[in-house]
Image (tube, grey):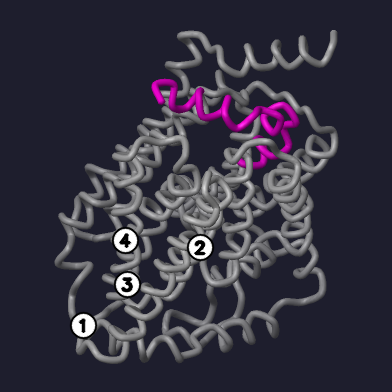
């Protein structure tokens, strides 16, 4: 079979799907939306657990049930195949080292998307068939989560904008933005494939994320938002027909944002800005990291301490031991050692390289930049969690390692996502 015939056969397979696959993928994503929307609203501590935890469980049933149909292992790349199974095997080991039939542990594993065990299963989405249907649905899910985020922000604006900061309103902002809102940035990464109305929803969502980050002085949220917008600006520039016009527009917007931000920060008298100014120069990480380094022993650095692993840290007022490190790459080492982090990096770094430098379309470049975006954020934030953010990383791995998807011309890719344009 010649190259043209092989490409056409792959394209036909990429674009086609049957009714069963459509139903299964809808059930999967509806289950995920139910699960993450329920767990996020519970972070407010104002909604009944007896109502939303059953919705989480129903979502899990939908996710696991549909996955049995959707998982169809196929690897174009032998390198990815080898290291993916090594990484998956080690993830299972980490998970098993924390498994217990204790009710509280099981609830943590299955019902806590941030600090439980569900995120160890996220890489399995790489085994879903790489199809146009999958990627089209991903965009729809991100937009639905963005709308839910905006609705939640309105419903709980009293908590989100309380003048006096406390642990609850800070954590609610973290959960709302990182579980629901942040992935709207990916819509901006892929703006060329969406209508103006969808891009507008994404812009509004990202702006609300940034405003909440300022109000609650969440530096990690602000960093994610600003970095995401910079990456989106880069993709806008390289995809624009007129580089001069797009470059001038971006530089102008950047200067306006910097000047406006500095002016507001220095001159506008808002309680939230006082708190941000104070937090902006306060080091809240070094002490925790020092305790982490002191407590980790030789073998711990290699294989970690398992899913429920902890380290001695008496500075947080919540007991002498902590099970998380907000610096997420250290958290990965705590749970699975350098082996865990190393296996992840040998998969993600080549994916970024292939997606950015060996692709004919911006779709693949957007996924490569998202993986890079996620990796950078493993320093200031907790990002290896059961959210759309982490799902996009592993969907992106499949995209970037696919020589076929990388070879699709940009105009063809646009015609698939925007057939009426």
Q: Earlier in the sequence, mark 4 or mark 1?
A: 1
Residue linked to disc 1: 164
Residue 309: x percent and y percent? 62, 65
Give the distance between the C-alpha atoms of the residues marked 2 and 3, in whole angstroms: 25 Å
- The residue stretch that appears in magenta: 396-421
Give the distance between the C-alpha atoms of the residues marked 4 and 1, in whole angstroms: 22 Å
Q: Is residue 166 visible?
A: yes
Classified by dominant secondary structure, the portion drawn in magenta counts as helix
Q: Earlier in the sequence, mark 4 or mark 2?
A: 4
Figure disc tally? 4
Q: Are circles 1 and 3 on residues that touch, CB within 8 Å? A: no
Q: Earlier in the sequence, mark 2 or mark 1?
A: 1
Q: Are circles 4 and 1 on residues that touch, CB within 8 Å? A: no
| For residue 261, side relative to residue 399 (left or right) | left
Instruction: Please determine whether, in this image, residue 218 is positioned above or below residue 407.
Output: below
Q: Earlier in the sequence, mark 2 or mark 3?
A: 3
Q: Observer-nearest residue: 149 or 211?
A: 211
Q: Observer-nearest residue: 42 or 106?
A: 42
The residue depicted at 47 percent of the width and 70 percent of the height is 223
Give the distance between the C-alpha atoms of the residues marked 3 and 4, in whole angstroms: 18 Å
Q: Determine the secondary structure under disc 4.
A: helix
Q: Which mark is residue 230?
A: 2
Mark 2 residue crowding within 10 angstroms, few (<14) / some (14–19) / many (20+): some
| For residue 414, side relative to residue 152 (left or right) | right
Residue linked to disc 3: 170
Residue 409 part of the magenta segment: yes
Residue linked to disc 4: 207
Specify the quadrant of the image occupied by residue 336. Answer: bottom right
Residue 313: x percent and y percent? 56, 83
Q: Observer-nearest residue: 251 or 150?
A: 251
| For residue 233, side relative to residue 328 (left or right) | left
| For residue 70, side relative to residue 191 (left or right) | right
């Amino acid at each position: 079979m010649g190259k043209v015939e092989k490409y056409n056969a792959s394209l036909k397979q990429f674009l086609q799907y049957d009714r069963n696959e459509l139903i299964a993928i809808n059930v999967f994503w509806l289950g995920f939306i139910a699960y993450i929307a329920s767990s996020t609203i519970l972070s407010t501590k104002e909604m009944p657990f007896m109502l939303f935890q059953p919705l989480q469980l129903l979502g899990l049933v939908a996710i696991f049930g549909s996955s049995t149909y959707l998982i169809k292992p196929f690897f174009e790349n032998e390198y990815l195949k080898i290291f993916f199974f090594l990484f998956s095997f080690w993830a299972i080991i980490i998970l098993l080292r924390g498994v217990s039939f204790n009710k509280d542990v099981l609830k943590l594993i299955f019902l806590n998307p941030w600090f439980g065990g569900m995120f160890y299963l996220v890489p399995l989405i790489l085994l879903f068939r790489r199809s146009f249907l999958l990627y089209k649905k991903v965009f729809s899910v991100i937009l639905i989560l963005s709308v839910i985020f905006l609705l939640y922000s309105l419903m709980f604006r009293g908590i989100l904008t309380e003048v006096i900061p406390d642990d609850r309103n800070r954590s609610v902002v973290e959960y709302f933005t990182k579980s629901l809102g942040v992935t709207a940035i990916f819509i901006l990464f892929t703006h060329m494939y969406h209508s103006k109305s969808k891009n507008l929803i994404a812009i509004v969502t990202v702006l609300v994320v940034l405003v909440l980050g300022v109000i609650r002085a969440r530096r990690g949220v602000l960093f994610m938002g600003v970095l995401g917008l910079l990456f989106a600006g880069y993709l806008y520039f390289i995809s624009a027909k007129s580089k001069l016009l797009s470059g001038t527009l971006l530089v102008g917007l950047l200067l306006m944002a910097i000047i406006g931000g500095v002016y507001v920060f220095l001159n506008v008298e808002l309680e939230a800005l006082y708190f941000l100014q104070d937090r902006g120069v306060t080091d809240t990480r070094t002490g925790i990291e020092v305790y982490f380094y002191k407590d980790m022993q030789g073998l711990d650095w290699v294989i970690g301490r398992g899913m429920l692993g902890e380290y001695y840290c008496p500075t947080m007022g919540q007991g002498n031991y902590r099970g998380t490190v907000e610096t997420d790459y250290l958290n990965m080492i705590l749970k699975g050692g350098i082996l865990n982090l190393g296996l992840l990096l040998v998969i993600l770094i080549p994916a970024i390289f292939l997606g950015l430098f060996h692709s004919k379309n911006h779709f693949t470049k957007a996924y490569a930049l998202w993986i890079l975006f996620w990796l950078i954020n493993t320093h200031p934030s907790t990002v290896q969690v059961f959210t759309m953010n982490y799902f996009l990383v592993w969907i992106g791995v499949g995209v970037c390692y696919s020589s076929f998807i990388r070879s699709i011309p940009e105009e063809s890719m646009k015609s698939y996502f925007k057939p009426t344009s």
